Amino acid sequence: MNRVKVLQAWLWCVSLWPCWLSHAVPLDCKDETGSLIQCTSISQEKLLDRVIQHAELIYRVSEESCTLFEDMFVPYPLYALRNQGGTMCHTKPFPIPGSKTEIQQISDKWLLHSVLMLVQSWMEPFVYLQTTLNRYDDAPDALLNKTKWVSDKLLSLEQGVVVLIRKMLDEGILTPSIFEHTLTPDDEPSPEIPESVLRDYNLLICFKKDAHKMETFLKLLKCRQSNKLSCLSY
Amino acid sequence: MRNSGAVLILTFIAKLILQAAGVSPPGKPRLTSCRSPEKETFTCWWEPGGDGGLPTTYALYYHLENSETVYECPDYRTAGENSCYFNKNDTSLWVNYNITVVASNALGKNISDPVEVDVVYIVQPNTPENVTAVVVHDEQGPFVRVSWEKPRTADTRSGWITLIYQIRVKQEKDEKWEEYDAGMQKYYNVFSLHPDKECMVQVRCKPDHGFWSEWTQTTYVKMPNYIPRERSLWILITIFSIFIVLILTWTLNVKRNSMKLCLLPPVPGPKIKGFDKQLLKSGKTEEIFNTLVIQGFPPTTDYENLLVEYLEVYDNEEQELVLDGKELSEDFMKSKSSSDNDSGRGSCDSRTLLLEKCMDGREGSGSDQHQYSQHGETSWASTESSESQGAEPGSPESTDGRAKTWPVVFPQPHHHYPVGAVKPAYHNVPEILNQLSPHATPSNYHQLHHQDIPQQELRFSKSACRHSQSYNQFNLDSIDTPAPGVPPLPSLEYVEVQRVNPENMLLLRPLSDPNREPERSDCTGEDYSKVKVVTSHNILLLQRDTSHQCVDDYSQADQCTTQQPPHPCKPAVHQWNSVMPQEGMRVMGNGYVDSTVLMPSF
């Protein structure tokens, strides 16, 4: 009798073994091959560091993309064209302050949310940018690769910021806000090169700025996390 | 129409007048640069284009990218002349400023080209501050530790700006600066500086996206005098090499002599044996020349031949019984050596003769010699071999009974030659023979008795005739005692065997005898004979190789046979007969086997 009981208990344990595994895995993590692996937990500081690294990389790549684009259309004085066009970057749902004092007054919550909003606002335009860049005859491969890379990295950055928000602010993700994009993909064949060029160049420039914003906000956030008093008082 | 035309003409004339006067509207100004030191404020500078001779004022106008409102520069003074300073309140980040400068004077104004500026991208921090360089003494060697502070205005604490630093170092008399990246840290250790030299240090910084600041003022630091670590390695190497050199020197010293021999082989000086340098120095020429003269020198060809190879001539077996068989057999055994080679034979065999050497040997085996001498001339050859062997126990040649030198052959136990004196063989021989006991039985000297001597090694010396003649000489002397009929020979004279008596006695006659048959002289022309084969009777069969000069006296042989058939002559003759079946051999009447010849027919 005892033996039978022990055997039953053991069988139950064995059958419930996959459940234990799932319990042990808080998050669904996938490695490169796509198979489920056990996620390693990461500290908040390290996560923030990684997010900052992402933002830095994205900014650097956007800067290089701008340079490549300018080199591509050297004969066209883009600055002049730009002035004439009076272009501007698309507006955000809520204004982001432009001075240090104002920014430093923003709370952590708002900082994170601003970053998240920025990231989400740029996902679609980059898809558009990829299609338009392909239309150019002599667009360098490096430029195309970089824009593709930025699109991917934006996704991962978004994920990271979501996790950060969850960890730092203990709140779930709000409904993703829908942004109005002033730029719509052109299904028509490309018009005069200068116009599309101007538009694309403007996109790149605006993205570069927003990438810098993200980086700055995240760095500010990091400082606050590590040294709250000194960061706020300055 | 006319009014406008008139106005135009008037303005044109006015301008001309003004130009003649040297005044004009201002030139176009140009914005040179805008910089923000801390990403919170920024400053723009412009360059005037020319004032046109009249006092000109400049004004800077700007508008932001997303508004049309034009603002004028809030502060013209803070940053100096021809500049515009935007404070914190007026600075917006991530927004493009469209800036223009307008120059105006009494005659007109001029507008510069607009410039788009985003503050975030024009950050150039101030230089780092409080750069200090200190020499730190470490066990591995001194190094310089450079430390500095961030520029006062940059806000790195809140993370608003991230600065990275760069340091450059130059030692005196160097041409180039060496740059090192210090990252975000505010200190740096500079190694590998040369001792006792002054060192110049400068630092600059840069935000993560922006421009490099200017280099700081030079900071000087003096490196102390020290021995760098690498020198210690050289010291070790030096000591090690010195050690090795010492060992080598010691080794060379120990092996000094052998080294000398190796490098400088001694040159043999000229030396004349028996020659005393002292005599030369004393200046007595006659004595010198006397010492130079060797008795018995110059060598005749006979001597040379005698030196080279010798025949061993032994007695008959019958006469061996007379001898002390035991001892003799020993010698015979000794003499069985097959080597015909006389190389390496220095001492006793040499003509110049170390008689003293041989003397020692002789004395030792005096008894043997005496014994041998009893047998006398019967076995000259054997005695020769045995005696010589006895005579030279020490010399290696004694074992080889083959080659002998004449002088050595007849040592006398009671004859002690003065050391150093070289006496001619001829002198010795009669003395020896006189001393010998009359027991010497005549023997067949001509019988060749050999023992297992391979034929190719045996060689008759050049003048087998002479050989035999010399033998004859001795025999003659020996025979003289029992047979006084033979006249005593003078020294230094050859004799030759004329014929063999039935009593086994050689009938000799001197070479100088005018009756000498001419054909004998031909024998002198003989050369070596080669032994063709050794027969079963231990007899050498010689090979014919030269001309037939020596004539065989078959008649004499016949004479011998006819006279005394049963006599011992017969055996000799018989042996001759047996000897003679081969070609190329000839027996002379005097009993010699001559190399040259036809088949004798008996």
Image: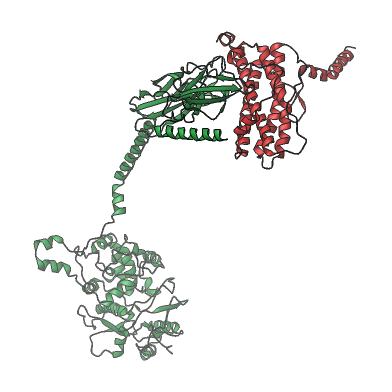
Chain identifier for the red-coloured part of the image: A
Instruction: Answer with left or right where residue A61 lies relative to residue B384.
Output: right
Q: Nearer the viewer, residue A148 or B519?
A: A148
Q: Nearer the viewer, residue B86 or B1?
A: B1
Spot occupied by residue B443 in the image (x, y as percentages of width and height):
34, 77
Instruction: Answer with left or right where residue A223 lies relative to residue B423.
Output: right
The picture quadrant where one finds residue A48 is: top right
* Residue occupying the far right of the picture: A1
Instruction: Answer with left or right where residue B546 lies relative to residue B152.
Output: left
Q: Nearer the viewer, residue B216 or B249?
A: B216
Image colour for chain B is: green
The picture quadrant where one finds residue A99 is: top right
Above or below: residue A143 compared with residue B521: above
At 60% from the left edge and 40% from the top edge, which residue is drawn? A75
Q: Nearer the viewer, residue B446 or B461?
A: B461
Res B180 visible? yes
Instruction: Answer with left or right where residue B26 lies relative to residue A141.
Output: left
